[in-house]
Amino acid sequence: NPYDAGRIVGGSSGGEGAIIGSGASPFGLGSDIGGSIRMPAFFNGVFGHKPSGGLVPGTGQYPLATGPALRYLSTGPIARRAEDLWPLLSILAGPDGEDGGCRDDLPLGDPDTVDLSKLRVVSVPDNGVTPVSADLRDAQDRAAAALGALGARVEEARLQRLKHSLDIWAAAL
């Protein structure tokens, strides 16, 4: 970990997250099925995005996912700055002529065109099983408030069935 050698880098794309977090590379690629872009980004103080399944080709992945697994495994960008994720995703998205699982019917809209007054933000504090640290909860509340200040409709919800989310994900995987 570029910030503390006593801590881990957070997942199978952890080396990528560490090299970006240390400033040795401005961006990179990760693969994610259960957090392997998102956790290394989080652990190394950078930004990562797991695209919707089928948006970015998996060409070069080994083994290449097929069938229903394509909904879960995604290749996506990791970057030092959040504003770099959109241009990187714009470059990566769409069929490449090799990966038959990548779809060309998934829209990749420009985030600048989102009408925030029509956006409904549902803030879920936790899954009802695993506690969330006060710092993370505060960051989530501040993000929701910032979206609300920009015109989004923000509401908090507790989803009782979310307590089964890990079991459902593991069974589907």
Image (cartoon, rainbow, N blue to C red):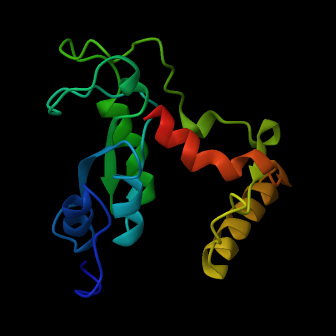
Residue that appears at 41% across and 55% down: 38
Number of numbered tags placed on the structure image: 0
Residue 82 screen position, x and y as percent: 44, 57
Q: In which quadrant of the rendered image does the N terminus lie?
A: bottom left
Quarter of the rendering containing residue 47: bottom left
Depth check, front residue: 112 or 64: 64
Residue 84 screen position, x and y as percent: 38, 51
Residue 79 screen position, x and y as percent: 33, 57
Relative to 154, 30 lies left or right: left
Residue 169 screen position, x and y as percent: 52, 41
Quarter of the rendering containing residue 150: bottom right
Q: Do we see residue 139 in this rendering?
A: yes
- In the displayed structure, would residue 53 be above or below residue 136? above
Relative to 102, 137 lies left or right: right
Depth check, front residue: 27 or 50: 50
Residue that appears at 55% across and 49% down: 166
- In the displayed structure, would residue 113 be above or below residue 82? above
Relative to 37, 158 lies left or right: right
Q: In which quadrant of the rendered image does the C terminus lie?
A: top left
Residue that appears at 40% across and 12% down: 104
- In the displayed structure, would residue 148 be above or below residue 153? below
Q: Do we see residue 54 in this rendering?
A: no
